[in-house]
Image (tube, grey):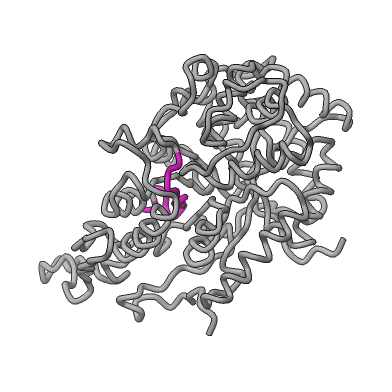
């Protein structure tokens, strides 16, 4: 295949494996998700392999599932993302650090401060994964009786983005003159008061932190519903997609790029990185056997809990060996719900079979040898189904080690992945321009991502 560009690779590291049986696999660290020594080692291994970013998902509640399922989950205890990534910033030098933060249950000023701080602490390696929080139990932890409507969450998220990025632009890059002789610390003419008043938010500003190293931390988005796609096309610089097949990936890729052009954005100013669960073996048969062993560690209590959460509807009262019933609309994540329903109908799965897939990860998986995995990744890149992948490891440390030690060298041998970082910041890794300050355009000579 003719390759004119390289893959970008993120590492999905909260939880350290999406697979419910990961902590039980022979040789796995059962506490890998909540052991800082382990997580620091993983981050350093990923950095040595030149990964673009270490990515942390987040939940603002324990997973909304029955205790019979919850008691089997290794995600019940996890570090708060900003605390962990700030610590990892001091333990690493180049790898990007991407945190999830909610636009539904947080305030723009908090989010702007935290990410600006992380970007400065890390020397320009921060990224913000914008989520609208689908878990209905999260609402109960923030004084609400029920979850906000799905579409309303996205309306708020769009305004939230405008406020946060506006706050990051509170100061020109050259505002802090620190003139000791004159006693002038900053130039007040280079400070902007946002004074935002919108449908959902009212924020005066300015932010009490200098403009981030990257101008703005990299904007990441993961929703694939229609409102999620539109939000991504208007705001995101990276999408962590959920498409489970090459054809679905190509359709999603084309749709996002089309939407970007419609709003005046250059298509190459956004990278699409589908989540990919990767299992490596000496042979394809061995890799499949590893996957089967992993899947066999998923207890039905856990699988049905995961399925209910993805559907936003409790199906545990139906015959496990019968078909999936009709699922009413909910305010849960629409992309996950539709993916599971489509899988059940397409493959004629019983609830029990679907539950096992839900608990064992039901999305895109590359299961094979370093060569076959590289073949598939290359095909996705060449056929414009993705710009890379957000890699999920089957268990830790073995699954991560297998990818770093065996798949990465194969990708490098083919010229598909870097051998060293191109610069110090996450924007450098991803090939993204530093955003111009909207209030002080003369303070930055970097190009914007708008089509001229």
In the rendered view, does 23 fall on the left or right side of 208?
Answer: right
Q: Say which of 333 and 44 sits in front.
A: 333
Quadrant hosting residue 356: top right
Task: Where is residue 395? Give x, y as percent.
Answer: 65, 26
Q: Which residue is drawn at 11% across and 71% down?
A: 182
Residue at far left of view: 183
Q: In this view, does 337 lie above or below 401?
A: below
User: 23 or 121: nearer the eye?
Assistant: 23
Q: Which of 396 and 250 is in front in this view?
A: 250
Residue 88 shows in this picture: yes
The answer to whether residue 126 is visible is: no
Horizontal side, residue 188 vs residue 244: left or right: left
Q: Is residue 22 left or right of residue 43?
A: right
Up/down of 136 relative to 418, above or below: above
The magenta stretch spans residue 234: no
Whether residue 127 is in magenta: the answer is: yes
Is 243 rendered above or below residue 172?
above
x 41%, y 38%: residue: 81
Picture quadrant of residue 295? top right
Question: What quarter of the picture does the N terminus occupy?
Answer: bottom right
**Range covered by the magenta-colored residues:** 119-134
- Tell me where residue 106 appears, x and y as whole percent: 31, 46
Residue displayed at 20% across by 65% down? 178
């Amino acid at each position: 295949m003719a390759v004119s560009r390289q893959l970008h690779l993120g590492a999905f590291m909260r939880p350290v494996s999406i697979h419910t049986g990961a902590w039980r696999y022979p040789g796995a660290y059962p506490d890998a998700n909540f052991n800082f020594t382990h997580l620091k080692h993983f981050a350093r291994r990923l950095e040595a392999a030149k990964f673009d970013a270490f990515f942390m998902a987040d939940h603002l509640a324990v997973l909304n599932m029955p205790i019979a399922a919850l008691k089997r989950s290794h995600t019940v205890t996890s570090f708060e993302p900003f605390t962990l990534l700030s610590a990892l910033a001091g333990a690493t030098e180049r790898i990007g650090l991407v945190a999830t933060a909610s636009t539904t249950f947080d305030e723009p000023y908090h989010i702007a401060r935290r990410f600006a701080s992380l970007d400065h602490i890390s020397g320009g390696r921060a990224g913000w994964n914008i989520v609208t929080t689908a878990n209905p139990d999260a609402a109960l932890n923030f004084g609400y009786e029920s979850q906000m409507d799905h579409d309303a969450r996205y309306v708020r998220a769009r305004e939230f983005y405008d406020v946060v990025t506006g706050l990051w632009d509170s100061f020109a890059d050259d505002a802090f003159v620190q003139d000791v002789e004159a006693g002038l610390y900053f130039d007040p003419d280079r400070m902007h008061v946002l004074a935002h008043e919108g449908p959902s938010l009212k924020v005066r500003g300015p932010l009490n932190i200098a403009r981030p190293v990257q101008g703005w931390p990299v904007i990441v988005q993961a929703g694939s519903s229609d409102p999620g796609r539109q939000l991504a096309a208007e705001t995101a610089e990276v999408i962590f997609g959920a498409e489970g097949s090459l054809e679905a990936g190509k359709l999603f890729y084309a749709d996002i790029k089309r939407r970007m052009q419609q709003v005046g954005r250059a298509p190459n100013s956004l990278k699409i990185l589908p989540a990919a669960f990767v299992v490596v073996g000496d042979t394809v048969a061995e890799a499949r056997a590893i996957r089967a062993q992993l899947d066999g560690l998923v207890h039905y209590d856990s699988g049905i809990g995961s399925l209910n959460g993805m559907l936003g509807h409790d199906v545990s009262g139906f015959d496990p060996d019968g078909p999936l019933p009709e699922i009413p609309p909910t305010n849960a994540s629409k992309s996950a719900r539709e993916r599971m329903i489509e899988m059940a109908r397409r493959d004629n799965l019983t609830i029990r079979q679907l539950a096992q897939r839900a608990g064992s990860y039901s999305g895109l998986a590359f299961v094979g040898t370093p060569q076959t995995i590289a073949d598939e990744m290359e095909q996705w890149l060449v056929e414009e189904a993705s710009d890379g992948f957000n890699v999920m490891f089957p268990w830790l440390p073995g699954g991560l080690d297998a990818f770093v030690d065996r798949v990465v060298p194969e990708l490098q041998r083919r010229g598909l992945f870097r051998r060293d970082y191109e610069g110090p910041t996450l924007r450098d890794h991803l090939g993204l321009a530093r955003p111009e300050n909207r209030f002080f355009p003369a303070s930055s000579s970097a190009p914007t991502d708008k089509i001229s």
